């Protein structure tokens, strides 16, 4: 039995460390689990404890975060099956928006919208908004 998918579109400030914020929120969401990172253009995973993730991985515009290496291995072996529900998140960071280049859209794909996922989305939105409030806004004309 295959599982479906869902997604959420969030706004984030352009030219900020968006991936860094995302990874921190994932780590809080899966507290106590050894989360791993995978760039969408690679098949290699890195634990979030690896400095490479924070120096190189956070420059990625599209990536996956798994709850653990065991979950990443299950996804690799079995794909989207019920046992894997919401153990992998897919993020896509867009280019600056033509209508307002101060912002980018961040796509977040997951398996099933649950209360836990809604809390994750709100935490992520809140953290991205807190970065936004630190972004200088131009003076009104």
Image (cartoon, rainbow, N blue to C red):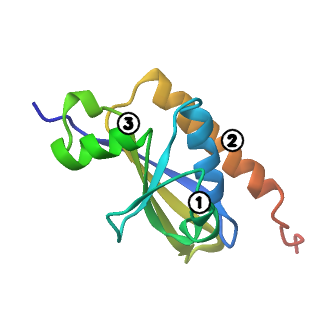
Q: Position of residue 54 (x, y in %)?
A: 63, 62
Relative to 94, is 50 above or below?
above
Numbered disc in front, either 2 or 1:
1
Which residue is depicted at the point 75% across and 57% down?
132
Residue 18 sits in quarter:
bottom right
- Residue situated furthest top in the rendering: 115
Q: Quadrant of the N terminus?
A: top left
- N-terminal of the pair, mark 3 or mark 2, is 3
Residue bearing mark 1: 19
* Label 3 with label 1: CB-CB less than 8 Å: no
- N-terminal of the pair, mark 3 or mark 1, is 1
Which residue is depicted at the point 83% across and 67% down?
137
Which sits in the foreground, 9 or 114? 114
Q: Residues within 10 Å of mark 2 (few under 14, many from 20)?
A: few
Is 121 positioned to the left or the right of 6 in the image? right
Q: Which mark is residue 87?
A: 3
Q: Kindly state the secondary structure of the residue where label 3 is placed.
A: loop
- N-terminal of the pair, mark 2 or mark 1, is 1
Is 90 positioned to the left or the right of 14 in the image? left
Q: Position of residue 60 (x, y in %)?
A: 51, 69
Which residue is depicted at the point 77% across and 49% down?
130
Q: Kindly state the secondary structure of the residue where label 2 is placed.
A: helix
Residue bearing mark 2: 126
Work out how far the residue at label 3 is from the one at label 1, CA to CA, in angstroms: 18 Å
Which residue is depicted at the point 58% across and 57% down?
50
């Amino acid at each position: 039995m295959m599982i479906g998918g869902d997604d959420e579109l969030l706004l984030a400030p352009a030219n900020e460390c968006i991936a860094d914020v995302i990874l921190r929120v994932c780590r809080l969401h899966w507290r106590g689990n050894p989360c791993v990172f995978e760039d969408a253009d690679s098949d290699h995973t890195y634990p979030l404890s690896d400095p490479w993730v924070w120096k190189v991985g956070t420059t990625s515009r599209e990536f996956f975060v798994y709850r653990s290496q065991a979950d990443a291995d299950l996804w690799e072996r079995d794909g989207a099956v019920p046992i894997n529900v919401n153990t992998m998140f897919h993020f896509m960071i867009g280019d600056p928006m033509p209508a307002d280049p101060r912002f980018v859209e961040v796509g977040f794909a997951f398996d099933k919208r649950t209360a836990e996922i809604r809390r994750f989305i709100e935490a992520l939105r809140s953290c991205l908004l807190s970065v936004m409030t630190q972004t200088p806004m131009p003076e009104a004309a």
